[in-house]
């Protein structure tokens, strides 16, 4: 409604400013269709959730920018790392712009929520940026690969980890569509979907690909299927990794993956059966990032030296 990238860090500080923001909210379809008639107190409840998200996004930028300036002045970091951090700040700003692009879709006629495709775009960019920052941090902490790793053994585990990461990323994207379309509020049974392994209206829309982004039955089934395949693949990685001659640090990280994926799968089923209460949905989304983090850490630990022994 009222996007101010810098000054927008501050919430309304006076009654008149609250009223002004509320009057702006009254002009969008969400108020007119869903919340028509609720007062200023009701508006404040939904305002704080949105404001907190935007505030944290801006805060992350400052948390990176201010120390970066200090470290550059002191010459405490390499030029390469400084450029990477500057790139992350720029990408973070771009992510904010994508966020506004997403929010703006909720202002269109007869719209009561943001467009799911834009939501998933915003989510995907956030995940990609998080992976890049995490990988950079791991490189700073452990710049050199473990020289004692067996390249042949480690390569097979590394290949499996890449498959796991691709799967979890696709599962997160599918989860974004599930959240964006409120697909979790339907088919609240497990493991079957209202008595069917595959919902009868899985391919009810035409053309077929539209089902992946608009058909609630297909969207939820895809999320379930990808999550299940991800669990299986991570346990394949776990079995092979623990049986291999890998280092203790790699085995520890793979074990951490195994526990994380079990917890995440259980959270997903719980969220579904409870019909997506806010707390469960939030924990499920947050733990997806924790699971992804364990995978990235494991992948980082499987780096091998490119130097050829004499």
Image (spheres, helix red, strand yellow):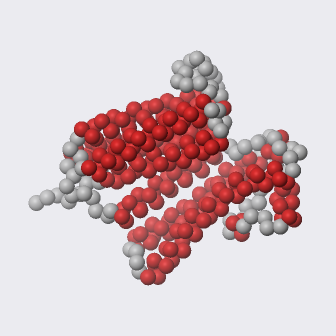
> Residue at 56% of width from left, 61% of height from top?
92
Q: Is residue 50 above or below residue 284?
A: below
Residue 28 shows up from this direction: yes
- Tell me residue 84's x, y (percent): 45, 66
Quadrant location of the C terminus in the rendered image: bottom left
Task: Tell me: 272 left or right of 138.
Answer: right
Q: Is residue 44 above or below residue 270?
A: below
> Residue at 65% of width from left, 62% of height from top?
55
Task: Tell me: 13 left or right of 184.
Answer: right
- Tell me residue 179's x, y (percent): 63, 39
Q: How many tags in the picture?
A: 0
- Tell me residue 104's x, y (percent): 72, 51
Q: Quadrant of residue 153?
A: top left
Q: Quadrant of residue 283?
A: top right
Task: Tell me: 19 left or right of 182.
Answer: right
Residue nearest the observer in this picture, 232 or 32: 232
Residue found farthest to the right: 37
Residue 109 shows up from this direction: no
> Residue at 31% of width from left, 53% of height from top?
301
């Amino acid at each position: 409604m009222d996007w101010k990238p810098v000054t927008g860090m501050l919430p309304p500080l006076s009654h008149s400013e609250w009223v002004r923001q509320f009057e702006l909210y009254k002009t969008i379809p969400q108020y007119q269709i869903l919340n028509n008639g609720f007062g200023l107190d009701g508006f404040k409840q939904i305002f704080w959730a949105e404001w907190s998200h935007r505030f944290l996004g801006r805060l992350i930028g400052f948390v990176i920018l201010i120390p970066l300036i200090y470290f550059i002045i002191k010459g405490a970091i390499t030029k390469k790392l400084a450029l990477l951090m500057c790139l992350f700040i720029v990408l973070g700003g771009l992510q904010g712009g994508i966020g506004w692009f997403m929010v703006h879709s909720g202002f269109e006629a007869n719209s009561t929520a943001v467009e799911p495709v834009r939501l998933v775009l915003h989510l995907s960019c956030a995940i990609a940026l998080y992976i890049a920052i995490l990988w950079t941090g791991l490189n700073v902490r452990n710049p050199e690969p473990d020289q004692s790793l067996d390249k042949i053994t480690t390569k097979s585990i590394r290949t499996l980890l890449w498959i796991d990461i691709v799967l979890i990323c696709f599962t997160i994207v599918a989860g974004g569509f599930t959240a964006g379309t409120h697909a979790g509020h339907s088919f609240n049974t497990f493991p079957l979907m209202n008595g069917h392994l595959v919902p009868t209206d899985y391919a009810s829309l035409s053309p077929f690909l539209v089902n992946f982004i608009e058909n609630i039955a297909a969207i939820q089934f895809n999320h379930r299927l990808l999550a299940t395949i991800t669990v299986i693949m991570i346990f394949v990685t776990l079995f092979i990794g623990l049986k291999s001659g890998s280092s203790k640090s790699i085995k520890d990280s793979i074990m951490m993956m195994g526990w994380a994926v079990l917890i995440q799968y259980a959270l997903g089923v719980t969220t579904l059966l409870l019909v997506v209460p806010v707390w469960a949905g939030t924990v499920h989304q947050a733990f997806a990032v924790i699971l992804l983090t364990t995978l990235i850490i494991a992948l980082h630990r499987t780096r091998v030296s490119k130097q050829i022994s004499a």
